Amino acid sequence: MEMRTGSSGTRNRTPRLQPRWFIVLFWKVHRAVVRATGGRRGLWLPRDQRWGALRLTTVGRRSGQERSVIVGYYEDGPNLVTMAMNGWGEAEPAWWLNLQAHPTARVQLADGTRDVVAHAATGAERARLWERWRALDKDLDGYASRRPSETAVVVFEPVR
């Protein structure tokens, strides 16, 4: 495995990923389970040392149609935080491109639904939120090093 130097200056192994076809299939099945059960299965709340899963519904940037995807998240006060990654593949995820065009969205959580507006964290906010993800996923820097560009940290703020 390739060795990388992380942001802390330590050497990290690039973690192994499942084959791309498996990642895509897994998330398609997961999304189908959530849809078929109305969210009773496949969505969960985050815990102290574990991220949760939510269903994000965006408006397609070209089609104008609603598009849904399941993403991992954690809570940061009233906000929800996720990573704009596509199974750690090279391309930006379509949902993130959709949010850049139309930042309002709907999230379905294990305990309810809410309307949100999204933005990419920058500067000190991004650094703080990245560190929190690192506490939840020890391989975060290694996975992120597989991508050709910086992985956006996406913040969902509740619509007031």
Image (cartoon, grey):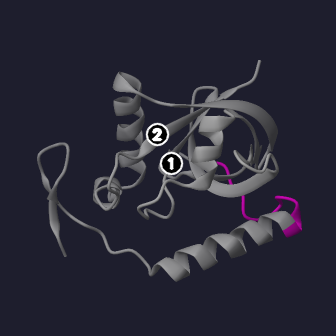
**Residue type at numbered disc 2:** Val
Residue depicted at x 12% and y 51%: 10
The residue that mark 2 highlights is 153
Q: Quadrant of residue 105?
A: top right
Instruction: Name the foreground residue: 117 vs 128.
Output: 117
User: Which residue occupies the foreground of this view, 74 or 90?
Assistant: 90
Q: How many marks?
A: 2
- Say which residue appears at 34% left-offset and 49% top-offset: 149
**Residue 41, magenta (yes or no):** yes
**Residue annotated with mark 1:** 84
Q: Tell me the residue at 58%/74% (across/down).
A: 24
Q: Which label belongs to residue 16? A: none
Check disc 1 and give the amino acid type.
Answer: Ala
Residue 93 shown left or right of residue 158 in the figure: left
The residue closer to the viewer here, 150 or 1, is 150
The answer to which of marks 1 and 2 sits earlier in the sequence is 1
Of residue 36 and residue 51, the one placed in the foreground of this image is 36
- Locate the C terminus and report the quarter of the image it occupies: top right
The magenta stretch is: 36-45
Q: Is residue 6 above or below residue 146?
A: above
Residue 44 in the image, given as x and y percentages of width and height: 68, 55
Q: Toward which corner of the image does residue 117 lie, by quadrant?
A: top right
Q: Secondary structure at mark 2?
A: strand
